[in-house]
Amino acid sequence: MTTRRIRSAAVAAAVAVGVTACSAPGGGGTGDDANAAESVVIGVGSEPDTLSPLLGYGKDGNSKIFDGLLARDTDLKLKPALATALPKITDGGLTYTYTLREGVKFSDGEALTAQDVVYTYRTVLDEKTNNTARSELDAVKDVRATGDDTVVFTLDYPYAAFAARTVLPVVPEHVAGGQDPNTGDFNTKPVGTGPYVLTDWSKGEKLAFKANPHYWGDRPTVKSFTMAVIADDNVRATRLRSGDLDGAVLPPNLAATFENDEGRRTYEARSYDFRAVTLPTSGKVTGDRAIRRALDAAVDRRAMVDKILDGAGRPAYGPLPVDDPWYERGIERPHDLAKAERVLDEAGWKAGSGGIRAKDGRRASFTLYYPSGDKVRQDHALAYASDAKKAGIEVKVEGATWEVIEPRMGRDAVLAGFGSVGDPDFGLYTLLHSSLAGDGFNNMAHYDEPAVDQALDAGRRTQDPATRAAAYDKLQKALAENPGYTFLTHIDHLYVLADRWDGLTTQLEPHEHGFASGPWWNIEDWQPKK
């Protein structure tokens, strides 16, 4: 996907000299243009819990510390990484064989072997490992090494999306193998084959990286970069404007304030990233299907796109964007307050004091949490509450930290964000399958719909495109009839950076952005502008 220059005017070019500021998280610089081009400081909204792929870090690719057998290019097409080529697929899609690239070393200088690949996948698949993405490798029956350079995967069933799951980063057995994968030092002191190595991680503040001297690919021109962790959107924008940052992830309203800055460039990436309200089935109010259907009809998605996202997004009627090839046309639900009221009337939710409905003595009222500092989620939550109130449902909006929210996810509504790219199985299974209810951030709504489970299993266990399409069509229709979430918007991601480098592009992005995604997904390929 190509980048898009929004607008620029001749003002304050000096403001863009981010990394040369003495207060920059990376430790500042000398002011020399060459040195500045070799060091980058990026402001992101969050940091990972771990840097270990064994626990899920980097599972969708783009880790700067690690490589997978395969990687993705700008257009998300699979390409070889640690493997010399795409896999050889035999036995009707049940056997995948990879040959490893020669001469690859980990950042500690030790050689990569096929046994490292085997160790990585077997550890992820071990039920003792706390990896909530394990279900994405459910098809794997066995993985084994044939010599030092060949890895063979045997599947239980022909999983069409398996090759794309082998972007999973490979870790060194000689380092991680002697540790508990859940608690070992490898989680914060990783060793990989990627273009960069971690040099410092100050939790809640920054992660610093430098070029890996043992990297098997071309040496990066950007010799070091820092991810400054700044949860508050406004603070991130302020630090970008002050020159403390070279670039930042920003919501649309704040990105717009940089439109006329000479020397800065705004990048817009389409995404599968959606905002939705989880409606736990165990909730006294949210567990009522009529409440969920009424909220689905009452919400004004188009207004959210126009007013909250400034048009940088699309209405969401389910997990898949409306322009996705797997999207089922005809499931769109327009803003329909009359329908919402009718659904509630028929279910026995009658208007009560203050216009809030009640049934059997229980008020149609529940709490909706959103993560503090996330202005986009806050605005979605407030708009959602306003729309709900018009139908007679009271939604009490509260901002909180994730430490407060996580213990409540099973019973309280959350303004959540999800979305995965590459295949409809990615993201849908973990979002909706009843077997994963309450498994970390998987199926936060504890959704349980047999027709959806059956469709997810059918779509996962065949390589026939027609059969898969029918399964996902069925899934989307069933989800519209019995929503466990109120899907609100799909969000375009916006990034503002100092315009000093060539080679920056954006990809079609998943929910996670800013750390692995963004224009810096290929930072090792950047070159200074001449």
Image (cartoon, rainbow, N blue to C red):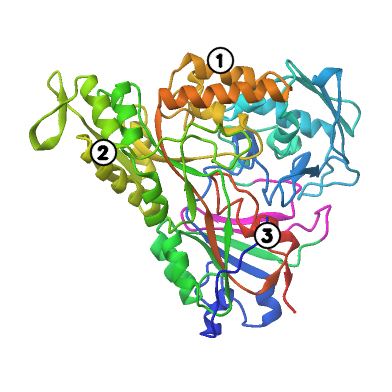
**In the displayed image of the protein, which residue is found farthest to the left?**
353
Relative placement, left or right, of 267 versus 436 is: right
Q: Quadrant of residue 328?
A: top right
How many residues crowd mark 3 within 10 Å: few (<14), some (14–19), many (20+)? some
Residue 121 or 136: which is nearer the viewer? 136
From the top left corner, tell me how far across and down residue 318 is, in percent: 48, 34
Left/right of residue 233 with respect to residue 81 in the rendered view: left
Instruction: Pick the residue in front: 351 or 362.
Output: 351
Q: Position of residue 413 (x, y in %)?
A: 33, 34
Find residue 94 and report its image quarter.
top right
Q: Which label belongs to residue 289?
A: none
SS under mark 2:
helix
**For the image shown, how many numbered marks are present on the structure?**
3
Q: Up-down: is 71 above or below 519?
A: above
Q: Which residues are magenta?
A: 190-218
Task: Give the numbered dot on residue 388.
Answer: 2
Residue named by callout 1: 454
Query: Residue 48: image x %, image y %?
Result: 53, 46
Whether residue 254 is visible here, answered yes or no, is yes
Name which residue type carries label 1: Gln
Q: Which mark is residue 2?
A: 3
Marks 2 and 3, how far apart in space?
39 Å
User: Is 110 positioned to the left or the right of 479 in the image?
Assistant: right
Q: Are marks 1 and 2 in contact (CB under 8 Å)?
A: no
Q: Earlier in the sequence, mark 2 or mark 3?
A: 3
Amino acid on which disc 3 is placed: Thr
**Residue 47 within the magenta-colored segment of the rendering:** no
Label 2 packing within 10 angstroms: few (<14), some (14-19), many (20+):
many
Q: CA distance from mark 1 to mark 3?
A: 38 Å
Task: Report helix, strand or loop for mark 1.
Answer: helix
Q: Within 10 Å of the Cα at label 1, are there few (<14), some (14-19), or many (20+) other Cα atoms? A: some
